């Protein structure tokens, strides 16, 4: 009988879109020297039991995590692989820059969503992501989904992003941030109510308020994806590829500050660029470093 030797994999947990530990969105980051068996990615993600586990893969045998500037990157929830994840990309770049002391100013990740770049900046890390348009959506078609999620909450606009399969629901301007923060959202039945495959993520968003004692934000959001096994995601980079597109048009702005008002909360700085791209800027706090035996 052949007994396989256990592999030791470096693993980290980083809280993304925050400079403080235990806020933002935690992601596990696993550095792979060699290819893993396909099913082990999912097993590790299930074991870590965070919204996402990122796997950073060397593209060439001669590459290393300190000198190289291009890596493969995949993201897994505890339930499945996903095509795009902003906070786990930010976490991966933070691990390479701050724990592996990568010498490059810009890293390129080869992913299911194409090549994504992460550049170190004075106030965090800037990620270059695609910008996804959100088209007007017939509210009657998704009425059951919205009513199941938020009951009789007043809705001002409904949009759909076919590229990301995310439904954007803008709440009435009559509501404020605390209303969105405290809103009870029923996610458990959503995969049964919407089972066509059209919607895989629900964005609730609200226009920002002028700054008083607190910093001014252009818009607020919360994000839910029970279709991928995530009731609520604390801070979601991929949702902001859609939100940036929508709010830029609504507000006539290319530079925006956004706050995702989940319990943990997270702040994002957004800059729209030519060619249908968006720079998403955030910080990350690395809270755990260890070794995984597989």
Image (cartoon, rainbow, N blue to C red):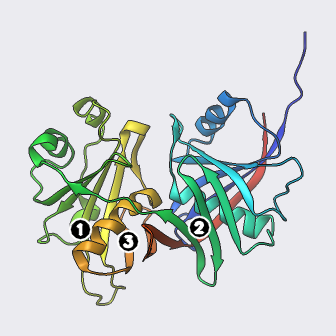
Q: Earlier in the sequence, mark 1 or mark 2?
A: 2
Q: Position of residue 223 (x, y in %)?
A: 35, 54
Q: Residues within 10 Å of mark 3 (few under 14, many from 20)?
A: many
For residue 290, say whether it is visible: yes
Q: In front: mark 2 or mark 3?
A: 3
Q: Residues within 10 Å of mark 2 (few under 14, many from 20)?
A: some
Q: Residue 158, which numbered label?
A: none
Look at the numbered disc 3 and give the secondary structure of its residue.
strand
Q: Position of residue 247 (x, y in %)?
A: 28, 71
CA distance for labels 2 and 3:
17 Å
Q: Residue at x 43, y 38 (%)?
A: 228
The residue identified by callout 2 is 21
Q: Residue at x 81, y 72 (%)?
A: 103
- Count of numbered badges drawn on the protein: 3
| Residue 88 in which image quadrant | bottom right
Left or right: where 269 falls relative to 243: right
Location of the N terminus by quadrant is top right
Residue projecting furthest to the top: 1
Q: Is residue 267 above or below residue 188?
A: below
Look at the numbered disc 1 and give the secondary structure of its residue.
strand
Residue projecting furthest to the bottom: 212
Left or right: where 111 falls relative to 63: left
Q: Is residue 237 above or below residue 291?
A: below
Q: Residue 259, which numbered label?
A: 3
Location of the C terminus by quadrant is top right
The residue identified by callout 1 is 206
Q: Earlier in the sequence, mark 2 or mark 3?
A: 2
CA distance for labels 3 and 1:
10 Å
């Amino acid at each position: 009988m052949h007994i396989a030797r256990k592999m030791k994999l470096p693993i980290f947990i980083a809280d993304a879109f925050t400079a403080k530990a235990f806020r933002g969105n935690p992601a596990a980051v696993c550095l792979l020297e060699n290819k893993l068996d396909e099913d082990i990615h999912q097993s590790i993600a299930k074991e870590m039991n965070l919204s996402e586990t990122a796997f950073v893969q060397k593209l060439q045998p001669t590459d290393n995590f300190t000198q190289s500037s291009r890596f493969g990157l995949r993201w897994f929830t505890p339930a499945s692989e996903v095509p795009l994840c902003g906070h786990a990309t930010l976490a991966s770049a933070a691990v390479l820059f701050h724990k592996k002391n990568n010498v490059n100013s810009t890293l390129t990740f080869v992913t299911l969503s194409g090549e994504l770049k992460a550049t170190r900046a004075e106030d965090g890390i800037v990620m270059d992501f695609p910008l996804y348009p959100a088209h007007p959506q017939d509210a009657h078609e998704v009425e059951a989904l919205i009513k199941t999620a938020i009951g009789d909450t007043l809705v001002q606009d409904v949009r759909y992003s076919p590229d990301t399969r995310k439904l954007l629901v803008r709440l009435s301007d009559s509501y404020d941030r605390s209303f969105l923060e405290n809103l009870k959202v029923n996610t458990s039945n959503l995969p049964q109510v919407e089972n066509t495959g059209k919607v895989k993520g629900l964005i609730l968003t609200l226009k920002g308020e002028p700054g008083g004692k607190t910093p001014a934000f252009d818009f607020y959001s919360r994000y839910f994806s029970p279709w991928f096994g995530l009731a609520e995601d604390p801070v979601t980079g991929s949702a902001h590829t859609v939100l940036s597109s929508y709010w830029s048009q609504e507000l006539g702005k290319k530079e925006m500050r956004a706050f995702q008002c989940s319990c943990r909360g997270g702040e994002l700085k957004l800059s729209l660029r030519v060619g249908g791209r968006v720079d998403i800027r955030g910080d990350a706090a690395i809270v755990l470093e260890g070794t995984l035996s597989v």
